Amino acid sequence: MERSNVTKATLGRLPQYLQFLNGLPPGQYDHISATTIAKMLSLGEVQVRKDLAAISRLGKPKVGYRTSELISDLEDALGCKKLTPAILVGAGKLGRALLDYNGFEEYGVQITAAFDCNEQVLRMNKTSKEILPISLLKKYCTENGIRIGIITVGSGSAQDVCDQMLEAGITAIWNFAPCQLKVPDNVLVEQENLALSLAHLNSQISK
Amino acid sequence: MERSNVTKATLGRLPQYLQFLNGLPPGQYDHISATTIAKMLSLGEVQVRKDLAAISRLGKPKVGYRTSELISDLEDALGCKKLTPAILVGAGKLGRALLDYNGFEEYGVQITAAFDCNEQVLRMNKTSKEILPISLLKKYCTENGIRIGIITVGSGSAQDVCDQMLEAGITAIWNFAPCQLKVPDNVLVEQENLALSLAHLNSQISK
């Protein structure tokens, strides 16, 4: 199954399906239909059908999906069977908040370490994960096969951090700094703009 | 101009236009065309034309927009002329990161205070803004006409916080807790799912 065909909206609903299926009483649901799932989760039937079609083979008419197979396909699509390690550069408040956030593992990603150049941050580490000096970035990424990097430094140093990540073999970047990163064509960048959601709410209530 | 007609994607580009126009050498650009703006910002001309049409009256053929008018319309659309105050409940790492983030004001919103029920958080406040006990929420919101609330508590207490916000007169909620909030129809909720961007990156590199 090509995981890259799964849209972000579908991806967002997969954990809900997985949680639901894993919570079914054992032995009672060998098979389950998209209709049943839709009804029990109060979702549109067409949507559920499309979502499941994107990550699994079609269910059989009248019978639906074999539950164990669907669970396995959902886990595949979410990458739960094997967590992808990621690192973060910039262990300020936002970086540390992400480092302590548990919700990423549900989506198959685990932030395994953070890097910073501020000595004080390194000494004062109160998170459960390692915060290492930025000088160790390349060594760590190479040794641990890291391909995903998260940038939570200010926009002034974001491009510099990005360049160091590329040199360390990272090919996918989640950028929280409010600036456009220059990267080669084969590198993916997901630009996060936290202010935008708030601005959108504001524009809606300001009618 | 109806601000609510502006899509989130357009909204995201408005600060870039505003910054660009404000940075033009004084006196040289009484008028400016969408074509010029598109070229200088390396954006598609159709997109720029649509974006500007959503927030301003149409520019004149061959002449374009009167620059001062366009700046004023952009400021209106972004709400820069009058900052909308917002509050936040849950002054943990993520809450404090948002509290210290300056990028919201560019989009017309200012987080003026945070609330928490943890005494230690209240005493140890190292941010530049007030962190108040949650018992003062209603009083503060009423006195300051707050309509936007941000939830950065865990999913266990999110609905309780939401209910308190509604009672305090808040009509728009930005929810970082990974749970569905129950609200009346006239209340807007923007659900934030931070894990999703990371999951999307992961699914793209895992082809």
Image: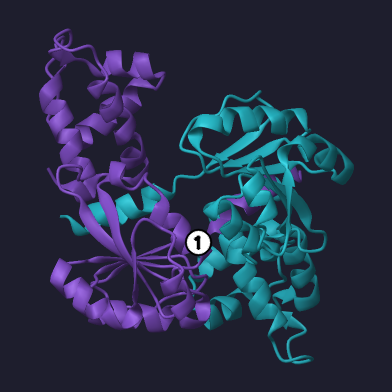
Chain colours: A purple, B cyan
| Chain of the residue where label 1 is placed in the rendered structure | A
Taking the image as shown, residue A65 lies to the left or right of residue A186, namely left
Q: Secondary structure at mark 1?
A: helix
**Badge 1: residue crowd in 10 Å (few <14, some 14–19, many ≥20):** many
Q: Where is residue B20 shown, x and y percent of the image?
A: 64, 79
* Above or below B162: residue A180: below
| Residue picked out by circle 1 | A94
Place residue A149 in its image quadrant. bottom left
Q: Where is residue A178 shown, x and y percent of the image?
A: 52, 70
| Residue at screen point 25% across, 47% down | A108
* Above or below B2: residue A173: below
Place residue A64 in its image quadrant. top left
Determine if residue B1 is in view. no
Determine if residue B88 is in view. yes
Q: Where is residue B64 shown, x and y percent of the image?
A: 69, 75
| Residue at screen point 38% across, 53% down | B197
Q: Nearer the viewer, residue A145 or A172?
A: A145
Q: Nearer the viewer, residue A203 or A163?
A: A163
Inspect the image, locate mark 1, and give the three-letter code of the amino acid beneath it: Leu
Quadrant of the frame with the N terminus of chain A: top left
Q: Where is residue A16 shown, x and y percent of the image?
A: 33, 30
Taking the image as shown, residue A134 lies to the left or right of residue A186, namely right
Q: How many marks?
A: 1
Q: Nearer the viewer, residue A92 or B162?
A: A92
| Residue at screen point 52% across, 60% down | A193
Taking the image as shown, residue B26 lies to the left or right of residue A181, namely right
Quadrant of the frame with the C terminus of chain A: top right
